[in-house]
Image (cartoon, helix red, strand yellow):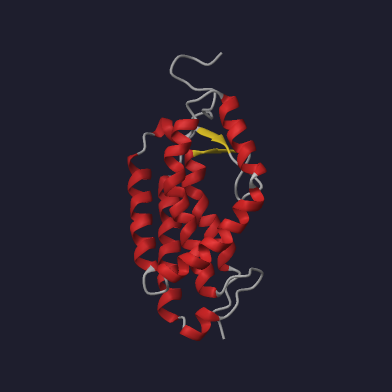
Amino acid sequence: MPEAGVSPHDEPAHPVDRAAIVASLNGCRDDLHTLLATASPAQLRRPSNGTKWSNEQLLFHMVFGFLIVRRLLPLVRVVSRMPRWVGRSFAGLLDAGRVPFHWINYAGSCGGALVFNHARMGRLCDHTIDHLVTSLEQAPDETLGRGMPFPTSWDPYFEAHMTLAAVYAYPALHYAHHRKQLTLGT
């Protein structure tokens, strides 16, 4: 039986390296700005490697990973306080909907790149990462170990159970994964 005030969703307390997470988020931001500043229009239209997206669409998808985390954080905070079966059921429902999710994920990045193209996605990324860094820096230590089940069929970096700290670290992993699929070089 957990002690009073401790949820069964809490992981044992261990220090979260906030500075490392912030550095990885800012590293992604810097890299994105370099890519956007150096890519030609022809390079942005070029197909990426291993996806159906163009380089520009893939860049938007990479930024979208940060946007998703901003929306996931409140969800994790709420679900982590509910009975464990709620989180497992929710993750199971999301896993069952993986086919429409993947289609929406693909189409959303195609459409998103039209609105937040290479000229606008850098500012969107800056705003989102600024928010994530501020949120991480203000999060009490005890909340960063709280977590919930995740739909592992949605993303290779989603784990069966993810803490808030892991969710903050996720978009840099997502970014690095897709960074390798860009074909912006000569």
Q: Is residue 84 above or below residue 57?
A: above
Nearest the camera: 10 or 85? Answer: 85
Q: As drawn, is 54 to the left or to the right of 69?
A: right
Residue shown at 57% from the left, 81% from the top: 46
Give the percent coordinates (x, y) of residue 14.
49, 33
Quadrant holding the C terminus: bottom right
Give the percent coordinates (x, y) of residue 143.
42, 32
Residue 71 visible to the viewer: yes
Residue shown at 53% from the left, 28% from the top: 12
Q: Is residue 103 above or below residue 162?
A: below
Q: Is residue 102 above or below residue 146?
A: below
Give the percent coordinates (x, y) of residue 77.
44, 34
Nearest the camera: 50 or 110? Answer: 110
Give the percent coordinates (x, y) of residue 86.
56, 28
Nearest the camera: 42 or 14? Answer: 42
Residue 156 visible to the viewer: no
Quadrant holding the N terminus: top right
Residue shown at 50% from the left, 25% from the top: 82
> Quarter-wise, where is residue 23 in the image?
bottom left
